[in-house]
Image (cartoon, helix red, strand yellow):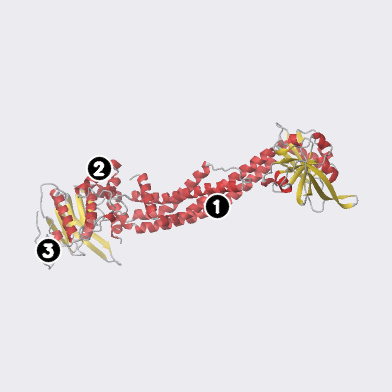
Amino acid sequence: MNVLENIQTALSAIASNKLRSLLTMLGVIIGVFAVTTMLSLGQMATQAITKQLDSIGGRTLLVQPRYAPGRPYRTFIADDLNALAGLPIRDVSSTSSGVTAEVSGRSANLSLSGVKADYARQSPDVKLTSGRFFTETEARGSAPLIVLSGTTAQKLFPQQNPLGQVLRISARVVNNSGLVLQREQVTVIGVTQPASALFGGGQDSGIMPINFLWRTFTDRDSYDTLQFRVDPGADIDSVQATVSRVLERRRGEKNFEVFNFDQFVQQFSQITTVLQILLASIGGLSLLVGGIGIMNIMLVSVTERTREIGLRKALGARRGTILGQFLIEAVTLTALGGLVGYLLTVLTVTLVSLAAPSFFPQVILSPGVALLALVVSALTGVIFGVWPASRAAALPPIEALRYE
Amino acid sequence: MSTSSSDPVIRLSGITKVYAGEGDAEVHALSGISLDIHAGEYVALMGPSGSGKSTLMHILGCLDQPTEGRYLLGGDDVSQLGEDQLARIRNERIGFVFQSFNLLARTSAQKNVELPLAYRGLGLRERSTLARTALERVGLGDRLSHKPSELSGGQKQRVAIARALVQDPAVLLADEPTGNLDSRSTREILKLFEELHREGRTIVLVTHEEEVGARASRTIWLRDGLVSDGRPVLDDDVPEVASV
């Protein structure tokens, strides 16, 4: 009696008790489903984030002021940039301001980014769907030109071509005479692809020359954050240390943070790993419960089939033969459950990717996860099948044959 | 007891079986049985309930081991073998036929008959050929793929007999093989046993029905765990016992 025949016997036993088998497998199905879905979604999210961070620029330094209670919040100024001029970095710093945009009865709260004249050249990842960026000359001249994100353009100009349209933008600013409402009119010259929801893509946004923002909504020559592309070949960590040292000297204290995106990637993957472990262990609990269900039903099955076991022993089945038969039956049951669970995962992951393409742009079904599903479910069968199977194997043949 | 120039297939000497009863009490199921059964004999093992015939049957079938005594099966001492060795002996030398047929449900007649061969490790093709031959021998060549639920009682018992024959055993042990059958099927099955006997099979049949026992060529009577010398032990009217 070989393994294949035992599997065949087990399958026909499962087929003859369809409902019971399904209910028994349910725990394993849910457990495997939970574990593999969490792992797959985690992988997909990590990959999406990593890709996006890479497209922003893996070798990017970001400097942000740190807010400390009771201390003045200080942004960066143009002189800070000048002090860093000797380093192997390119400045892509920007400033931002929240404004209200209005056009023919529709309005939106825009997050406005003021960017440098060479922004388009330095940011190959920002893709236009129509129109153009402002030229460097326009940018230097602080021209009132705006490039809107795709979703914002859709929202403000649902029926018409946004290019060439005039947008009224306004924001409250502090100047010499106190808080005043500053109003401007800007012309739409371009529309970009909607940004990923992971990076504030859900928010309405637009890009304008930084000089325009300095002139209208923000302090002249100030930056909320500094952002640098580190030249290829330069050591990002030592550059980061130098930037930090220079700025600390200029500002008198270390009231700011320097990040690079590699750190973000690392932090993010740490977070997703912890989440994955957490959720997968919940799945593991379900597997435990499922395994106990398997053990229960196998014990019932051994009792029900006491006479059969006696007969098999009378016909020459050894202890090991019976043990193997029942163990294979348990493993077949759980492996089948694992397979069903994994197929459900494939289905779910695909649906999730279709429903939320900005968070999970690509379906990842790694062979490792599939293998894990199979191994874990089979192992559940072995662990929880051993006891019932060894009880079956230990039955003395006469007792078993006499059993009614 | 008959004697023969050849060595007996079964030789029991001083077999006892003691079970632990309640408390310190011991139950002596067999109290020292010695007997020989020769190749080609058709023996009926009879006795009232409690006489120890089931216990003796289990020991003969290597399903159980004696407390004391020696059991030579085909010249080999099997009274002290381990569990797996006994399983092998059962597989190769003993063919069982049970009162309640003990066929695997949802399994075709042919697959049922193949089962002992599977435990012997034979290949699929060889099993299939031998099983078909055995089923044809018992007249069920046209019922190979029938499930037990699709067969009559007599047919089920014939499948069980085929399953025993396919092992080509040294001894065919039948435990009340007609106990669950109507009189017509009983006649059929007994006729089959007689044919097998004529073909030279060694058959040991346990029964409490005297007309069934009377068909055997020798009757061994048990009473209180002892062989009662081939004589009827009941007060009832018992037919004469043929001797080989």
Query: Which element type, helix, strand or loop, lies under badge 3?
Result: loop
Mark 1 or 3: in front is 1
Q: Amino acid at mark 3?
A: Pro
Is residue A115 positioned above or below A335 on the image? above
Q: Chain of mark 3?
A: B
Instruction: List x then y, in percent, for residue B114.
Output: 27, 47
Instruction: List x then y, in percent, for residue A167.
Output: 79, 46
Q: Amino acid at mark 1?
A: Ser
Q: Nearer the viewer, residue B169 or A304?
A: A304
Residue highlighted by disc 3: B232
Instruction: List x then y, in percent, for residue B42.
Output: 14, 53
- Spot the residue most to the bottom: B235
Q: Chain of mark 2?
A: B
Q: What residue appears at the point 9 percent right and 57 percent down from the top-left corner?
A: B242
Residue highlighted by disc 1: A281
Residue highlighted by disc 2: B129
Residue B79 shows which numbered tag? none
Q: Amino acid at mark 2?
A: Thr
Mark 1 or 2: in front is 2
Q: Are marks 3 and 2 in contact (CB under 8 Å)?
A: no
Whole-angstrom CA distance, mark 3 to mark 2, is 44 Å
The answer to which image quadrant residue A207 occupies is: top right
